Image (cartoon, rainbow, N blue to C red):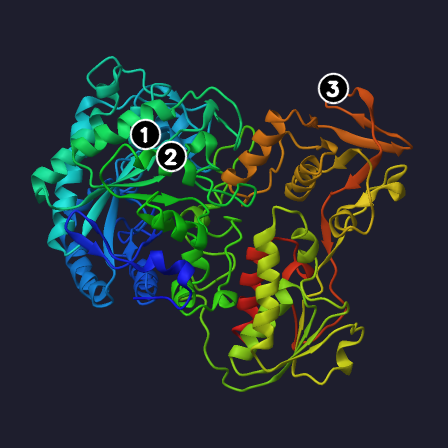
Amino acid sequence: MSTTNEKYSPLFTPWKIRNVEIKNRIVMCPMGGTSLFGWFELTGCHFDKEAAKLFLERAKNNVGLIIPGIAPLRDTFWGKWLWQNKKMFKDLKVFMDEIHKTGAKLFVQLTAGMGRSWAITELIAPLHKNKFTRALIKPIIDTSHELASPSPQPSRWAHDIECPEMTVEQIHEIIEAFAKTAKLCKEAGVDGVEVHAVHEGYLLDQFSIEFFNKRTDEYGGSFENRYRFAAEVVKAIKEACGEDYPVSLRYSVQSKMKGFCEGAMPGEDYVEVGRNMEESERAAKYLQDAGYDMLNADNGTYDSWYWAHPPMYMPENCNLEDVAHIKKFVDIPVVCAGRMDAEVGAKAVAEGKIDAVGVARQFLVDPQWITKLIEDRLDDIKPCICCHSGCFNFSSSKGHANTQDLTDTMGLARCALNPETMQSKKYYVEPAKKPKKIAVIGGGIGGMEAAILCAKRGHKVTLYEKSDKLGGVFIAAAAPSFKEKDRALIAWYVREIAKYPIEVKMNTEVKEVNSLDADEVIIATGAVAKRIPVKGADSAVEAVDYLLGNKSVGDRVVIIGGGLTGCEIAYDLYLKGKKPTIVEMQDDLITTKGVCLANTSYLRDFFKTNKVPVHLETALLEINEGSVTLKNKEGNTFAVDTDSVILSVGYNPAPIEAKGKHVHVIGDALKVGNLRSVIWGAWTVCMKL
């Protein structure tokens, strides 16, 4: 395999894990929800055909090694062990034959569990807290088992829940399950297994980190005791499957933790309370000597989740330096993940800093991205924008566990930008039974998505945009320096529109729908900013005007509204050297459901670390010249001096007036949401036209 662009050629060379040869250096990393054995489903473990379809399509598009998402050794619901389901492994064997026809290899990732990191939901948390209901639901979902940790400690997601201590008997049961399940995987033709994980603050990682592990038995205390669980797992697998059967380990080089639920910023000088680099150097060698054949590495725990799940605020290749360092201490292959850029990754491989590049969510957005890389069609690659709003939108704020809807929790690994991902039965492209003339009003993301999908289905599409640019309000959202992927997405849409016979009419405002020559009309006119009835509000700058650069601001800036947009504006202002202050009526920043904790915790930690003033449970009373008057939850009023005020208090839908069966309102014009609701909503409408 070769690429037409030489700078990527180091990625397309073979390498080995034990005796298994991988055709290239690109690893599809595991993602929650992509387990071949199902994920968090009431029906229990089964061979997941939707995940299988996902992987087979990526295998056909030149991925070297596939590692599906975590497979809990014991079902979350009903408590059945994976190794007890023999039919599932028969189905897996048939699937592995298909995977191998493509030349790809596949390892199954097995997890010991999550412990304190189990994302207990708002729905289940109260059932666990009550002894009676906890016992009542135990046959269905044993929350005490799911939350079992090395030592009693608060849950990461619900701080008022104490996780119970795992017994030695439970530990041995898990080790036995690793061995039995790995053997069934080997018999099914799976190329290797990955142990999940001394990584990201999951159960085996909690055992290895002294901050979490306060045990006094053979699984706590000394270095050897803390890493004993992980070492015994690989030894049991090797005993069951043979020394030559490859076993990878998902591994976090450093924890990047300052304390409970408090992570370290990139470049910050801090005291590591988790695994520091000195211990990691020793641990990597120790785990290799125990029997692990590869380290699939990055950084972080759930307390510093943005290292393992980097949002757009984190630098690209954020883990490369640390992972490259740890490779010096082992003789086994090392993979690096975390916003990896293909060109940087290729250079790192060529220089021997790492053995392969781990990529995850880019595979959800664009299943063909490696093929496009090989063919030097870089502009055709749809970029991942690191939003996590489809793939992993576990959300949490002060006093709340995982507030994500249960349907979302049960359906991870979907993609905000690509509705077909893990939802192929619900979202798909098929030719229209009767081609129609379709008018799309509004050239934002929703309008462009609708226009492209309708054109793919064979309709004749005209897109109307009142301004001279396509992108709508997303142009403003993509304006900050750290939104380079958002800007790349807009550019991708503009190029994609040009590939289809879509007539685009710029600088054309449609006021009367009935005047259009169209069988169906799609209204995607977006939303308008809310106004707040306080004295002096007219002197404030609207969020969109600031982001677009239409209005300038001074050095000291008060942002009214601590939602996602307000926080991103404050972050942008700080990066520009200004002095932002955030005012929010809720008891925490970014309390909206569906915004991933990895994203929100970065911003909260950033403001805390950099001492950005944040006034929670505080209302704006008036805006004066040179100051704002605020009122806190105790009823006290006070003033904050400021040069400028930015309003970021939300939006109201702004559809143009039109009625009739042939009129369809989508996106923010229907209900204000995010890119996921905009794009999925466009598909819901356009598939029926």
As helix, strand or loop, the secondary structure at mark 1 comes to helix
Q: Residue at x 42, y 35 (%)?
A: 120
Image-quadrant location for residue 330 = top left
Q: Return the residue at label 1.
A: 205
Q: Residue at x 62, y 31 (%)?
A: 588
**Camera-nearest residue between 72 and 490:** 490
Q: CA distance from mark 1 to mark 3?
A: 42 Å
**Camera-nearest residue between 57 and 333:** 333
Q: Amino acid at mark 3?
A: Glu
Q: Return the residue at label 3.
A: 634
Q: Does any portion of residue 689 appear in the rendered image? A: no
Farthest residue in the top direction?
216
Q: Amino acid at mark 1?
A: Asp
- Whether residues under marks 1 and 3 lie with C-beta atoms below 8 angstroms apart, the answer is no
Q: Return the residue at label 2.
A: 200
- Whether residues under marks 2 and 1 lie with C-beta atoms below 8 angstroms apart, the answer is yes
Q: Position of residue 143 (x, y in %)?
A: 33, 32
Residue 602 falls left or right of residue 52: right
Q: Amino acid at mark 2?
A: Glu
Residue 35 falls left or right of residue 668: left
Say which label, 1 or 3, has the lower sequence index.
Answer: 1
Q: Quadrant of the C terminus?
A: bottom right
Say which label, 3 or 2, has the lower sequence index.
Answer: 2
Q: CA distance from mark 2 to mark 1?
A: 7 Å
**Camera-nearest residue between 39 and 369:** 369
Image-quadrant location for residue 492 = bottom right
Say which label, 2 or 1, has the lower sequence index.
Answer: 2
Q: Quadrant of the N terminus?
A: bottom left
Nearest to viewer (mark 3 / mark 2): 2
Nearest to viewer (mark 1 / mark 3): 1
Mark 3 nearby-residue class (10 Å; few <14, some 14–19, many ≥20)? few
